[in-house]
Amino acid sequence: MTRLSLNSVKAQRYDPVAHGIGVLHIGLGAFHRAHQAVCTDDALAAQGGDWRISAASLRSVETVDALAAQDGLYTLIERGAEGDHARVIAAISETLAAARGIAPVLDRLADPAVKVVTLTVTEKAYGIDRAAMDIDPEHAAVAHDLAHPDAPQGVLGLLVLGLKQRRAEGHPPPAILCCDNLPDNGALLRAGVVGFARRCDPALADWVAAEVAFPASMVDRITPAATDETVALAARLTGLEDPAAIETEPFFQWVIEDHFPLGRPAWEAGGAIFAPDVAPFERMKLRMLNGAHSLIAYAGFLSGHVYVRDAMADAPLAALVDRHMRAAAATVGTLEGIDLDAYRAALIQRFANPAIAHQTYQIAMDGSEKIPQRIFAPALDALAAGQDVAPFAFAVAAWLRYARGQAEDGTAYALRDPREAELTAAAQGDAAQVVKAMAALPGLFPDPLKGDFLTLVEERLHVMMTDGMAAAIAAEAA
Ligand code: CS2
């Protein structure tokens, strides 16, 4: 079969090679290719401009090589109730593998043509202490990069070294846009970059603090990891071989704070919304979508559901998902132009999408990095407002049960969490012991949740451990 490339593909809506690079993206996973790159493709088609993407991968080289072999093109398959729709995305101009050398990435960071830097590196990659709003010096990559600031391996070290080069060459800085599911992600990334720079070059830290824009953004598109079936489906739909094909849902949302001093792609052409305050959108999405996702991941995985859609076909679990979203919505407040009931109904439909095979085990990953903003934050607000916290207690109990690392049939599984060893150790013993040890882990449970809330968690964990997850779900939903 012919490989996808500029030669083999039918005419694009725009001529990719006629457009220069204006964006550097770091973190070349499926999510970037299903989200920002697609929106940039629409912006290029609508308004042109030199806004193609230089896409860098920090660790893996496979996607870099696969895309390089097909001129940066890849197939996006949107899978919904109306069927599968394939489209070729041409927004990526070049791919860089930091694992093979960081110089090309640094050169792009310093390149005055690059006006925007976007990031999707996952929550755990940053190494920012969210309580202190500073770097976490114990984070492995941060610790390495502080010791070797000229040979960074992590995100903060790389950004700081690239900005240093850019400043030395006399160019104004790009806007840096975090596209990970973190609360207040612009301010958070600013704190991390300034904090890191402060340790190695205080003048640079001042320059970053004064000159670099870190707009906040809320990103949303459910994108399961691509599989061999994705590649086979792309071949059926396009007649071309594309090992970098990805699949995603039709829904797309991107809410961005419009602060790009050197300009930006016309992302509104791809459906992006520009808002003066992204925080309420972010709260809504993190608490209702991602919070319910984490509930589904832990309760669903342990009750035998491989995919989110299967969990949604389990009536008692689906009832708990609905209850969870209502409780989360009650902590979001009112949002201009958004009906939270309609948002909840749409989420339930999206989760149930029969064409999307999104593994509960994939979402279960990195719980210690996700639970704070997804579950603890709304639980804190609900507690302070005197609202029902039982839904959050159930979700936390399911996570603690999951942290035991053993399914109900005795099969062991890897947690895939940066704090895996600590969590697994704390999750042993009876429910009371687990809750106590987990609550004592540094920097995890917020203090106000260490009172009565923990009793609610413990009661639920006890049922999960003695009667099983399905019985716990049924009891909770009754
Ligand atoms: C999911 C998210 O894996 C996860 O933790 O909750 O990746 C989710 O699918 C996206 O945020 C949807 O926009």
Image (cartoon, grey):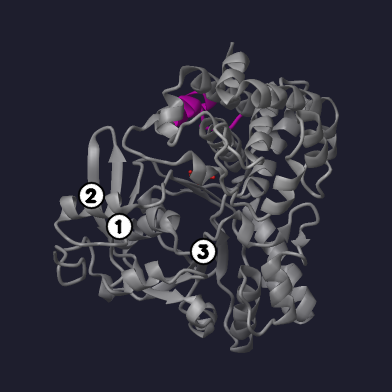
Q: Are marks 2 and 1 in contact (CB under 8 Å)?
A: yes
Q: Earlier in the sequence, mark 3 or mark 1?
A: 3
Q: Are marks 3 and 1 in contact (CB under 8 Å)?
A: no
Query: Magenta segment range?
Result: 334-347
Residue for point 79% across, 27% down:
453
Is residue 192 depicted above or below 84 in this figure? Answer: below
Residue 245's label in the rendered image is 1
Find the distance from the CA under tag 2 to the CA under tag 3. Answer: 29 Å
Amino acid identity at mark 2: Leu
Residue 299 versus residue 385: which sits nearer the camera?
299
Is residue 174 depicted above or below 46 in this figure? Answer: below
Residue underneath mark 2: 233
Find the distance from the CA under tag 2 to the CA under tag 1. Answer: 9 Å
Q: Secondary structure at mark 1?
A: loop
Residue for point 78% across, 74% down:
198
Say if residue 389 shows up in the picture.
Answer: no
Residue 477 within the segment the image draws in magenta: no
Residue for point 70% across, 82% down:
148
Residue underneath mark 3: 118
